[in-house]
Image (cartoon, coloured by chain):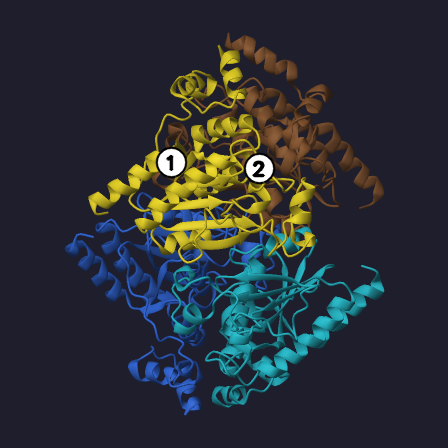
Chain colours: A blue, B cyan, C yellow, D brown
Amino acid sequence: MVILTLAVYRMGSPLNDATEAHIMTDIYEAKGYGELTIGFGTKLAILVVDFQRGFVDPSFQLGGGPMMEGAISRTAELLSVARQHRVPVANCYVAYPSAAAAPHWKIKGVAQEFRRDSQEAALDPRIVDFDYDYVFEKSGASAFFQTPLAAYFVKHGVDTVAITGCVTSGCIRASAVDSFQYGFRTMLVEDCSSDNDPQPHLDTLRDVGRRYADIVKAQEVIAQIKSQVRAGV
Amino acid sequence: MVILTLAVYRMGSPLNDATEAHIMTDIYEAKGYGELTIGFGTKLAILVVDFQRGFVDPSFQLGGGPMMEGAISRTAELLSVARQHRVPVANCYVAYPSAAAAPHWKIKGVAQEFRRDSQEAALDPRIVDFDYDYVFEKSGASAFFQTPLAAYFVKHGVDTVAITGCVTSGCIRASAVDSFQYGFRTMLVEDCSSDNDPQPHLDTLRDVGRRYADIVKAQEVIAQIKSQVRAGV
Amino acid sequence: MVILTLAVYRMGSPLNDATEAHIMTDIYEAKGYGELTIGFGTKLAILVVDFQRGFVDPSFQLGGGPMMEGAISRTAELLSVARQHRVPVANCYVAYPSAAAAPHWKIKGVAQEFRRDSQEAALDPRIVDFDYDYVFEKSGASAFFQTPLAAYFVKHGVDTVAITGCVTSGCIRASAVDSFQYGFRTMLVEDCSSDNDPQPHLDTLRDVGRRYADIVKAQEVIAQIKSQVRAGV
Amino acid sequence: MVILTLAVYRMGSPLNDATEAHIMTDIYEAKGYGELTIGFGTKLAILVVDFQRGFVDPSFQLGGGPMMEGAISRTAELLSVARQHRVPVANCYVAYPSAAAAPHWKIKGVAQEFRRDSQEAALDPRIVDFDYDYVFEKSGASAFFQTPLAAYFVKHGVDTVAITGCVTSGCIRASAVDSFQYGFRTMLVEDCSSDNDPQPHLDTLRDVGRRYADIVKAQEVIAQIKSQVRAGV
């Protein structure tokens, strides 16, 4: 039974209802993991993680992947609605002034190639608006780790953070855990997140969705933004 | 092939060479993930995460699991050697003074039952020495998140952190990411870490081992402690 | 003129209007420091710093001081109103499990005597309500440094933090700087804050009031709490 | 009149033995504040705070001050020796992509004028070496607050931080408190630190020197660097 389900994962299928139902029929479900839904609060922000050329563009060693173009285009659509409704948008990338400034990555490319002001560090123009977004550099995996992001959200009264970007099993996951830890209601936007391989993507949805965040789709976030406007929140 | 490998995972077998080889023959390996080994520095510390009754003891809703007793006994053995050689040991648990103090967990039990001074919060006596260890409470998943742990390690000149405890796909993983982000050399001790389900355990080793930490066994850490003593470090 | 003012400071008089006006007639005022007022937002919390026996009770080496009893009684009055109106209250103390766990204090007493569960660490019963307040231990000067305080405030939608406690030129100041840095509107409640010596108390109001926080009195905070209730915020 | 007062202050400054003796003959000394000396460890780093044109150059509203040129030239001398002996140097400035990204400063100029890539944000060329130093942006007062600085020091095994820059009673002080809180041995280099007004400078040395850091002169740090080299540390 489990083997069959995992085989489905390997085929890279999106997490459909049947799969989701199955995941919960397990030891974690029996213990009550995932039994609560967080839900949106009253002040949403969008966090876009690492949609920078070094990860997006397949001409770079760490760039591209089968889920990337879909995640980018759905994020662009979500951001368009968000900016129109004055929802705060934070947009970050990873970069270092030198390899000596990077932590102990096991990936040679990150410390060696992701230099401040390099092509690898440049945000994809489809997802950034430098006049609107709060744009910042980060040095770790999480967008919150030793960056001013939490303070920015506090100042703007944010209580809910919807996360998009890449890589799901890396910086997205680390950012979702920190968003949760900082007390925010956290939404991982699954169809706006890209992984190099669909399996770790699904594994992340499973682990994060059980503990820290609601797993949502771009259209749910868009509907939420529009409904908040109607409600006058 | 993949199905067979995953079937092996489900049997809860330790990650053997064949499996490891397989994991790396993939898109992540092609991109250079995991190609670097971090290695031990000159000053090691052991971090033990959440070996508290609420997670260890199967009589509690979130307690127990097939990997728990092995992880506890190997951790106890590792800690015995560590304390004998004056290696710093940090030992933490998650607890809250009230549900209002907890972040938005999706697991009802954590916010409701893990009260400061409760049985759920009590560290397992096999892995804690209150006269030797640095014992502290945490409120998030990561042992580093908004706790004095990094400062404790800085004061004691630590450059390498070996992590044990539970749950591998939850607090162990979050702690390993933060240890890496704080600039420490990070070792995830796989046979001292327990998950409710072997699959997320293995997924975590795969994701973390590619990016943030070396995946090691208790005996390697013990050998390292003994060799540092011989070397007079 | 300045000399006279400083003489007034030395007498430990509260900062009156004339004095305040004078302070601003200086090089800092000319540069525009202090020209903005922060003002209250819509969701206030009270932070009480280190009103623990080791600092409050004159029978302890670091305890007591000429401003202590007044600061305690005004804080108790403020907290009574706050709790009545369901304003969040956070209450902290500094303590360590061992001297090895403390950072490099230049004060022998803190690392040596302020032990977890000691008399020195016990909060003064006049200012704490364990059933209502969020009570937590801290290891540094700031109540925010590596503690879950910011996350607690985020979860409860707090945008304004009013700070009371001791010592003004030590932990109060460090906490006010961090509250500001985290993006909160920050109020230093001068007549609820105690220093061993009135001079550093006044110096702190001057430095902090120029940069990071409004300097207010307990009655202003009380009036604000009551007006927010009337306004239905 | 003010000049006379400042002259009085100046008679007390630089903090000579008589002044120091006086400060300590007080209620704080009686309580044991300042009785411990921290001392240098084995791995020093220099932290240079906010020597950026907006604070250094008197043609900017917040720029200049009577202590600035001395602090800059002594810092440049210290850094020259440090770089020659491969001592890590961290160099930061405060800047924002927009006023919306700044916390609630009471100083109009900081949020309004200190823009990323502006003249106000540009480091003084006398104290920065972009090929050697770790250069980073900060958003708060402290150089450690939500920046990768602590991780950089951890990665490079630093145990002692000597702090220079401006303004003593603002960002220097906040950085010294955080350096202490993070577990580092902290040295405030008094003759490499500049304040707009000598009085808050001295008040800061008094408050910080009692609690968190040794107050040292540039020549002591230089001698320490040279002696460590001789000792082969």
Residue C218 - label: 1
Is A135 on the left-hand or right-hand side of D182? left
Q: Residue furthest left?
A: A230
Q: How many angstroms separate mark 2 from mark 1 (CA)? A: 21 Å
Q: Position of residue B5 (x, y in %)?
A: 52, 87
Residue D188 - label: none
| Comes first in the chain, label 2 or label 1 | 2
Label 1 chain ID = C
Give me the residue at 33% from left, 47% from top.
A133
Nearer to me, A76 or A56: A76
Count of picture labels: 2
Give me the residue at 52% from left, 46% from top.
D147
Which quadrant of the structure image shows residue D178?
top right
Q: Give the SS element for disc 1.
A: helix
Residue count near mark 1 (Cα–Cα under 10 Å), binned few <14, some 14–19, many ≥20:
many
The amino acid pointed to by label 2 is: Gly
Q: Give the SS element for disc 2.
A: loop
Q: Tell me: residue B167, above or below residue B147.
A: below
Label 2 chain ID = C
Q: Residue furthest bottom?
A: A1
Q: Position of residue C172 (x, y in %)?
A: 50, 39
Is there any visible trace of residue A144 in the rendered image? no
Residue count near mark 2 (Cα–Cα under 10 Å), binned few <14, some 14–19, many ≥20:
some
The amino acid pointed to by label 1 is: Ala
Q: Position of residue B37 (x, y in %)?
A: 65, 66
Is there any visible trace of residue B182 in the rendered image? yes
Q: Tell me: residue C205, above or below residue B184.
A: above
Do the residues bearing badges 2 and 1 touch, measured as CB atoms within 8 Å? no
Q: Position of residue C79 (x, y in %)?
A: 39, 45
> Mark 2 — residue?
C64
